[in-house]
Image: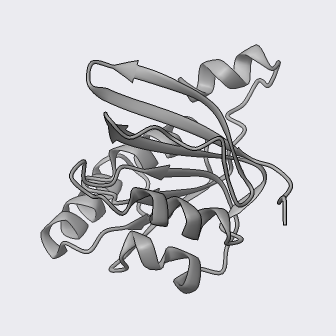
C-alpha cells in the first residue's frame, strides 16, 4: 500500500526512513517497512512474550540491527521517545475506547516528522476526526469491518 503510494508520487525508493510501530504485536508492520527500505524501526509493545517474538522476527528477517524493541505503552510514546518518525503505525485493541485521546496525544506531540504519515487501524463505529492537533485526516480504507485511516502532518490550528 505505502510503496504503491510512493511510486505514484514518482519516488523510486520507500520514502519513510524512520518508522514507529505502536501496539507492535509481532512487529509485522515495522518489519514490512524495513523490508521495503526503511532504515530503522522502533517497536512499542508491553507484552514480554510479544517483545521476544518481535526480536526473533527481526533476527529471522535479517534486521536485528535495524530495530529496537521497547517495553513502553503506546500511549506513553509522546513522552518517552525523542525521535521524529516519518511513518507511524498504530493498531490499538479494537475494544479500546480511548482512541480519540490517543490520537490527541500523538497529534499534540512531535512524534510525526514533517511530511510524515500516521496510519491507525480501528473498527466501526469509530469515525476519525478531520484533524487532531497537527494530524490531518487524509483518507480511510475499508477491509470488512476493519478500517485503516491515514493522517498526514499539517500545521496546527492553535
Horizontally, residue 47 falls left or right of residue 148, namely: left
Q: Residue at x 61, y 25 (%)?
A: 3
Q: Is residue 52 above or below residue 145?
A: below
Q: Position of residue 136 (x, y in %)?
A: 71, 44
Q: Residue at x 31, y 33 (%)?
A: 124
Q: Residue at x 83, y 60 (%)?
A: 156
Taking depth in this image into account, of 37 and 15 the one nearest to the observer is 15
Q: Position of residue 42 (x, y in %)?
A: 49, 65
Q: Quadrant of residue 76?
A: bottom left
Q: Position of residue 132 (x, y in %)?
A: 65, 55
Q: Is residue 79 above or below residue 14?
A: below
Whether residue 138 is visible, yes or no, is: yes
Q: Quadrant of residue 143?
A: top left
In the rendered image, the residue lying farthest to the left is 49
Horizontally, residue 157 falls left or right of residue 86, namely: right
Whether residue 66 is visible, yes or no, is: no
Amino acid at each position: 500500500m505505502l510503496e504503491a503510494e510512493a511510486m505514484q508520487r514518482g519516488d523510486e525508493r520507500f520514502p519513510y526512513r524512520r518508522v514507529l510501530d505502536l501496539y507492535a504485536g509481532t512487529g509485522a508492520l515495522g518489519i514490512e517497512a524495513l523490508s521495503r527500505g526503511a532504515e530503522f524501526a522502533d517497536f512499542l509493545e508491553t507484552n514480554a512474550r510479544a517483545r521476544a517474538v518481535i526480536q526473533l522476527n527481526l533476527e529471522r528477517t535479517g534486521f536485528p540491527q535495524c530495530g529496537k524493541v521497547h517495553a513502553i505503552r503506546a500511549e506513553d510514546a509522546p513522552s518517552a521517545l525523542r525521535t521524529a518518525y516519518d511513518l507511524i503505525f498504530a493498531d490499538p485493541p479494537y475494544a479500546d475506547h480511548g482512541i480519540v485521546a490517543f490520537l490527541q496525544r500523538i497529534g499534540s506531540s512531535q512524534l510525526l516528522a514533517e511530511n510524515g504519515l500516521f496510519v491507525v487501524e480501528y473498527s466501526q463505529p469509530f469515525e476519525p476526526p478531520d484533524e487532531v492537533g497537527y494530524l490531518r485526516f487524509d483518507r480511510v480504507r475499508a477491509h470488512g469491518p476493519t478500517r485503516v485511516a491515514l493522517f498526514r502532518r499539517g500545521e496546527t490550528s492553535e
